[in-house]
Amino acid sequence: MLEKLIFGPPGCGKTYTLINVVRDALKKGTPPDKIGFVSFSRKSVEEARTRVAAELNLTEEDTPWFRTLHSTGFQWLGFKKEQVMSKYDYGNIGNEVGLVFDNNTARNSQDGLISVSAREGNKYLEIIHRSIMRCVSLEQQFSDTEDYNLHWSLLKKLDAVYNNFKKENDKVDFTDMIRGFVKGGSAPSLDLLIVDEAQDLTPLQWRQINVMKENTKEIWYAGDDDQCIHRWNGVAVSDFIRACDNIEILNQSYRIPTSVFSVANRIVRRISYRQPKNWHPMMKPGSVNYHLSMYDVDIDQGSWTIMARTNKIVQKIANSLREDGYLFNLYGSPSLNQNMINNMKTWELLQKGSKLPLQMIKDLYAALPKVGNNAKIKRGVTKQLDFLEHDLILGYDDLVNNYGMIAPKDTSSRDMLSVSKDNRFYMDALTRRGEDFESPRIDVSTIHAMKGGEDDNIMVMSESSRACVKNQNQDDEHRVFYTGVTRTKENLHIVETESENRYQI
């Protein structure tokens, strides 16, 4: 069996190279359903699917094994959607053990990276999942967890209730999909398997790859050890570096300007264990700028991504931007609810005498208060709309006369939607700044969440946490900030706070 390892430094066209591998395989007569492209990351797989669709005219049906690792397990083992743990399932388990889970628990675990949450229930659940992904005992994972507010007795109780619930209700989580695949010991027959972002695979995910390898003729591993930033999830960079001896290093970045390259090089040379690489930046200068505060940076124009080491710092940034009247995406979600904005516009159009499609009316009705002194529509009328013709258009008078509208026409859109006091202040601040309510040009996230992305203007906060600064394995910190600065296409802004817990970029 042919094995090859691709090292792809930032912006060096790793995905382009891998799509060319797929193209060459197709030219040699390999059927598309005999080609696999897997990763722990949805972002990576979705990008590959988009590229093969655009460049090779292949649909999802043509490429059934372009999947995340958990989705590969889901498909191969024949699970059904209704078997996947839902937020209601987590709610029932929480009620039984006396713990509260984040409402996004089910959705946020899809990448095989257990999402961090302030909810106590999630902290316990993370220990359970990580013990499985690391292939260590629950006791070992609990011992390795640096949170002394958690209790072993409660963890054991949750583990027992959680597993029993899944068994009795025929439910699975995303970890089960991988674990079941490994235990089954069989895999789809493939002529070519590409493993993207392989530097971030956990021990369990490597076991899954090894099972798949047994039924594969040719396998390519791709990633960048210098961007291996998930060791806390059980990832060992050595598993990637030692995957095979047949290696290729992509040596030309199509993203990084020369000035940013110099900063990146300074950081990456601090990493003690890595694959040496000789790669080159774009022949454009770009800029590197140092600041004492994020307020010293002019972000009024252009596309921006602001990154920090921890969720706590990210939230501080988000609060500051909100106070200053900037619209932004926080972890991909708009800082101002877009459904609310759309419904406000719907009401304003109705006020002006417009007749609107039924779906816009249904969306508005779903958001309106229906009981109490603040009711805007009569109770129960929302269901009436489900029986109307889909192409029907309705105006304000139609709603009043036939469909339970009781709000006066002169009701402001903010009062109509019962916009909170905080959101009213925020909307006023956005208006004063002249911000577009619908098109955030600023993204805010942790460096971890931004991995794989890029932007014209990048701001990296050097502030970290005491735990990160005191981390015995400083390679982790070097890799994180290396990943952060290399998201830059044009201008890098480094904010060097006076905090004692900061990384020296």
Image (cartoon, helix red, strand yellow):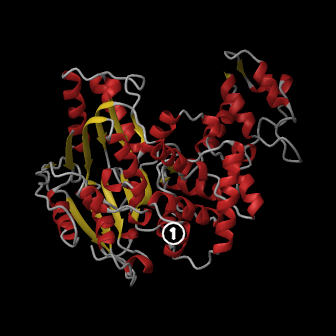
Q: Splitting the image into 4 quarters, where does residue 501 fall?
A: bottom left
Compared across the picture, whether 470 is left or right of 163 comes to left
Q: Viewer-proximal residue, 189 or 280?
A: 189
Label 1 Cα neighbours within 10 Å, binned few <14 / some 14-19 / many ≥20: many
Residue located farthest toward the bottom when viewing the structure as drawn:
500
Count of numbered circles on the image: 1
At horizontal 34% and vertical 46% (from top left) the residue drawn is 210
Which quarter of the figure is the N terminus placed in?
A: top left
At horizontal 27% and vertical 62% (from top left) the residue drawn is 238
Compared across the picture, whether 376 is left or right of 466 comes to right
Measured from the top left, where is residue 230 in percent x and y? Answer: 39, 61
Q: Viewer-proximal residue, 124 or 364?
A: 124
At horizontal 54% and vertical 58% (from top left) the residue drawn is 129
Query: Tag 1, which secondary structure?
Result: helix
| Image vertical order of residue 300 relative to residue 53, above or below | below
Q: Is residue 127 visible?
A: yes
Measured from the top left, where is residue 283 in percent x and y? Answer: 10, 51
| Image vertical order of residue 151 relative to residue 298, above or below | below
Compared across the picture, whether 98 is left or right of 196 comes to right
Instruction: Give the labeled residue for mark 1.
Output: 141
Compared across the picture, whether 116 is left or right of 151 comes to left
Measured from the top left, where is residue 315 in percent x and y? Answer: 52, 65
Q: Amino acid at mark 1?
A: Gln
Which quarter of the figure is the C terminus placed in?
A: bottom left
Q: Viewer-proximal residue, 425 or 158?
A: 158
Measured from the top left, where is residue 454 in percent x and y? Answer: 31, 50
Q: Is residue 118 visible?
A: no
